[in-house]
Image (cartoon, rainbow, N blue to C red):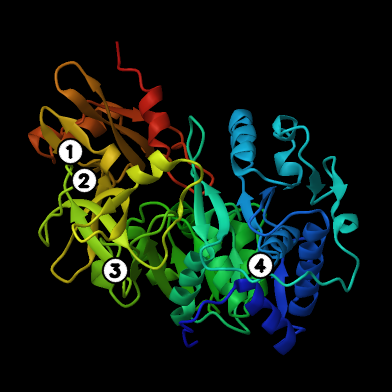
Amino acid sequence: MIQDPEFRTIADMLREHAQTQPMQAAVIDDEAGYSYAEFDALVNRAAAALQRDGVAPRDVVAVCAHASARYAVVFLGALRAGVAVAPLAPSVTHAQFGAMLRDSGAKLLFADGAAAELLPHAPAALPRVRLDDSIAGADFEAWLAPPGSTPQPVAVQPDWAFNLIYSSGTTGTPKGIVQPHGMRWAHVQRAAQYGYGPGMRTLLATPLYSNTTLVSFFPSLAYGSTVVLMKKFSALGYLQLAQQHRATHTMLVPVQYQRLLAEPRFAEFDLTSFRMKWCTSAPFAAALKADVLKRWPGGLVELYGMTEGGGTFLLNAHEHPHKLHTVGQAVAGHDIRFIDESGHELPAGQTGEIVGHSPGMMSGYHGLADKTREAEWFSPEGKRFIRTGDVGRLDEDGFLILMDRRKDMIISGGFNIYPSDLEAVLHTHPAVHEAAVVGVPSTEWGETPVAFVVKHVGATDSADELRQWCNARVGKTQRLAAVCLLDELPRSAIGKVLKRELRDGYSPPA
């Protein structure tokens, strides 16, 4: 697929596929499936209904629901009408839900049973459309404009808001990351080299409120592939769908790869249709990448970047099997630099915070000018970069080696300790299934590292035995103060370990 440098909207590209391959399946879920002609007609009806209801270009609508074909109709219908979408996670707190709706200024709320407990906390005057029959609100089919309706054309501009992605967090109000249409177009162009197109089938098992999903969802539709949406991930269910639909592309987070490869029946399924598998959103262990390459046909690409945009790195793991400890090389045209804690640029090869500039960058945090400025770094020549908050360095071949989140780095007795170093050591112990290291307060050292470990089934090693084993293999300043054994690590809906929960819930032994 050849990249087109001129800006286009995804909704316009969808319309072209409806004309050139009308019978090709566009979106499929466990209850419905739409061809490109059917999907495009429903998108028209949704866009026309928004215009009928007075939702103007550059307004916002919110969606809080499981991934579904109707969710996709709403998203694309809003985009065709020039309306931005705020996809909200059903897992947020009641207070966060109400705050995000107010912050976004949403004119309509689309929801299903996943949001049932949150809905009483939505603004009372906010109109609601239900995407299933489990909650109150206007019926979706009745809300749509009549069959055959078409919306008034809208000349969408690259700087208009495409969506507001609210940052994850366990406390406080998430920040609304405003991604413009130009940023999504940059994502579509970047994906052109990875084989999306007519006849391809993308299986997605992460939620549509997550940027993780959207960076694969939109290129799939833009280039005419079929998207298969999985409402809730299970390893066996995913493998069944992959075989049934002869999936060619997918986006998964590391914990999903881990669970799939651990499924006892994994080898029974025919996965030879896969051409490209993606992974992002959390640290992807080199050993797990190697296992995926060994056991799962098709290429494997790790994507490192921020929802806020800036610099992106891609590791084509199938082409660089000796670089699995890295997250790859910078995407062509992305300007990557490294800065110290004072914001001064560092010479090439030194370890520092990663900042990046590219065509795909957020407009800012919605209504939060101060927070937006904190996320930006300007070079001496005045060029705008997005700060990642991650610490890393480039190796001799230009591959990025990540150290840690800057906020997760532990300063103990004046020494910098990177939790990832300790986690890597723990993962080499045969009893350790998963490990996460955080810094906790220490009267003697300021901070000290503590490990939280999930053991393999049947492992008998005690917490103190694991601590002593690890401390015998690390430097004196890196030694663990304690090891805590857990049945599972707390994770977000897309698989990120919630280190804040570990840190806040830790109580030192008496």
Looking at the image, tell me whether mark 3 or mark 2 is earlier in sequence order. Answer: 3
Q: Amino acid at mark 2?
A: Asp
Q: Residue 427 versus residue 98: which sits nearer the camera? A: 98
Residue drawn at x 76%, y 46% as measured from the top left: 112
Residue 367 shows in this picture? yes
Q: Helix, strand, or loop for circle 2?
A: helix
Looking at the image, tell me whether mark 2 or mark 4 is earlier in sequence order. Answer: 4
Q: Amino acid at mark 4?
A: Val
- Nearer the observer, disc 3 or disc 2? 3
Quarter occupied by the C terminus: top left
What residue is pinned by disc 4?
228
Q: Helix, strand, or loop for circle 4?
A: strand
Mark 3 surroundings within 10 Å by alpha-carbon count, few (fewer than 14), some (14 through 19), many (20 or more): many
Looking at the image, tell me whether mark 4 or mark 1 is earlier in sequence order. Answer: 4
Separation (CA) of disc 2 from disc 1: 8 Å
What residue is pinned by disc 2?
421
Instruction: Identify the image quadrant of residue 468.
Output: top left
Residue drawn at x 78%, y 58% as measured from the top left: 50
- Nearer the observer, disc 1 or disc 3? 3
Separation (CA) of disc 4 from disc 1: 43 Å
Separation (CA) of disc 3 from disc 4: 30 Å
What residue is pinned by disc 3?
330
Residue 284 vertical placement versus 188 (above, below): above
Contact between marks 2 and 1 (CB within 8 A): the answer is: yes
